[in-house]
Image (tube, rainbow, N blue to C red):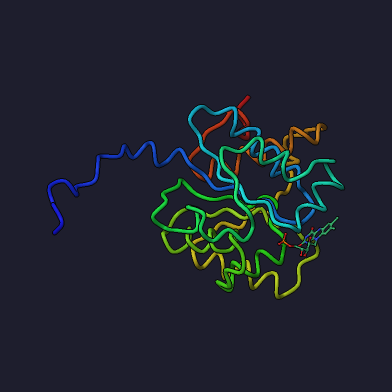
Amino acid sequence: MINYLNAIAPVIEQSDLMRRIVIAVTGSTGAVYGLRLLQICREITDLETHLIVSSGAEATLRIETQLKPSDLEAIATRSYGENDFEAPIASGSFETAGMIVAPCSMKTLSSIATGFENNLIARAASVHLKERRKLVLLTRETPLSLIHLRNMLQVTEAGGIIMPPLPPLYFELNDFSKMVDLTAGRALGLLGIVTKHRREWGVD
Ligand SMILES: Cc1cc2nc3c(=O)[nH]c(=O)nc-3n(C[C@H](O)[C@H](O)[C@H](O)COP(=O)(O)O)c2cc1C
């Protein structure tokens, strides 16, 4: 027999739940966006990062940053294998402030758009959509086919945010790393996480 009085769950502060985010790094060019996101998140006290690096990202990480997935995993609070469907982030019961896929390949976009859930990245993204939480995809490909565009539309209609990592050239920045940081800061801002890596037009 269940003792219903003892079964009452302890009170959890809402703010605790909002200090977790999921970050996925996939195999499109732009591995540095995933890296800087993790590094910026680490500067923020009490923000937990839950990381998945796709096997596709191993090549782009190596080619573009000379890093290995384990280097990113060392920066994250927790990390999970691409096929670890037993991970907490595979369930909607694990509350988060949102998920960012940075960068997001067209393959991962496609599996998210179709609900295919072929790996933990697509599963966690699907969970964020079904729970009506923030999902931000830093989609990277150019030019775009009709299939890419339809997949982006499908994710947008389901509540996701498509945010191609395009540099804000109106700030006349000549430092590429600053542009990356502004994009990472903007993506975190979409999840309600304010960082110093933000800049507003017309405000110094
Ligand atoms: C150097 C390099 C750059 C790539 N750039 C892109 C890209 O910009 N966009 C894209 O969708 N795929 C790109 N790809 C292809 C993806 O890595 C490939 O489709 C992979 O299967 C994606 O798998 P994932 O989404 O599970 O990481 C690139 C591959 C390599 C090796």
- Count of numbered marks: 0
Determine which quarter of the picture holds residue 83.
Answer: bottom right
Q: Quadrant of ligand 1?
A: bottom right
- Residue placed most toward the observer, 74 or 129: 74
- Residue placed most toward the observer, 86 or 147: 86
Q: Quadrant of the N terminus?
A: bottom left
Where does the image place residue 201, in percent across and percent down from the top left?
Answer: 63, 35
Determine which quarter of the picture holds residue 82.
Answer: bottom right
The residue located at (57%, 71%) in the rendering is 154
The residue located at (77%, 34%) in the rendering is 177
Query: Looking at this rendering, what residue extends furthest in the right direction?
Result: 63
The residue located at (63%, 70%) in the rendering is 151
The residue located at (54%, 29%) in the rendering is 44
Q: Quadrant of the C terminus?
A: top right
Query: Looking at this rendering, what residue extends furthest in the top direction?
Result: 204
Where does the image place residue 46, in percent across and percent down from the top left?
Answer: 48, 30
- Residue placed most toward the observer, 166 or 46: 46
Where does the image place residue 122, in percent across and percent down from the top left?
Answer: 59, 63
Determine which quarter of the picture holds residue 171.
Answer: top right
Where does the image place residue 61, in percent across and percent down from the top left?
Answer: 79, 47
Image height of 93 relative to 19, above or below: below
